[in-house]
Image (cartoon, helix red, strand yellow):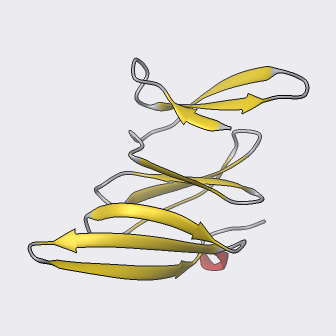
Amino acid sequence: LIATETNHPKSLLLLYWKPLKLIRIAIDLVPTFITAFSWGCVVGNSDGQFLAIDYNGQPISRFGTDKNVSAIASYGDTTLLVSTWHEDQGNLYILNLEHFLTL
């Protein structure tokens, strides 16, 4: 499981069930969105800044967009769906993360 903390906004919690272990990792953005992949997760904020992290808490890549993000979702193993909204128009972007990741 991956979670955020209210009292520590620039951190993520990684929770492992077997064996039970909780890891807090510091990140350099305040995440608004989190989506999971088989290799790790992508966290992002509404300003369009993203950070890819493996399940050991190690950063893999940092990337961004100049759009205001309203939602993200994973699709497959390396595709990130990014929804944006500006004035009265919404858009859906499909990002191939293979260009950003070194797995």
Q: Is residue 66 visible?
A: no
Q: Residue furthest left?
A: 87
Q: Is residue 81 left or right of residue 32?
A: right
Q: How many marks?
A: 0
Question: Looking at the image, which residue sits at the far right?
Answer: 19
Give the answer, above or below, for where 3 lies relative to 46: above
Left of 99 or right of it: where is 72?
A: left
Q: Can residue 25 be seen here?
A: yes
Give residue 35's quadrant in the image.
bottom right
Residue for point 52% across, 65% down: 73
89 vs 65: above or below: below
Q: Image quadrant of residue 3? A: top right
Residue in view at x 72 percent, y 29 percent: 15
The quadrant of the picture occupied by the N terminus is: top right
What's the residue at 43%, 21% (across, down)?
8
User: Horizontal placement of 83 versus 11: left or right?
Assistant: left
User: In the rendered view, does 58 fall on the left or right side of 82?
Assistant: right
* Residue 54 coordinates in the image, percent (x, y): 72, 49
Q: Is residue 69 above or below residue 1?
A: below
Quadrant of the rendered image containing residue 24: top right
Which quadrant of the rendered structure holds the C terminus?
Answer: bottom right
Q: Residue at x 49, y 73 (%)?
A: 81
- Position of residue 23 relative to residue 85, above or below, is above
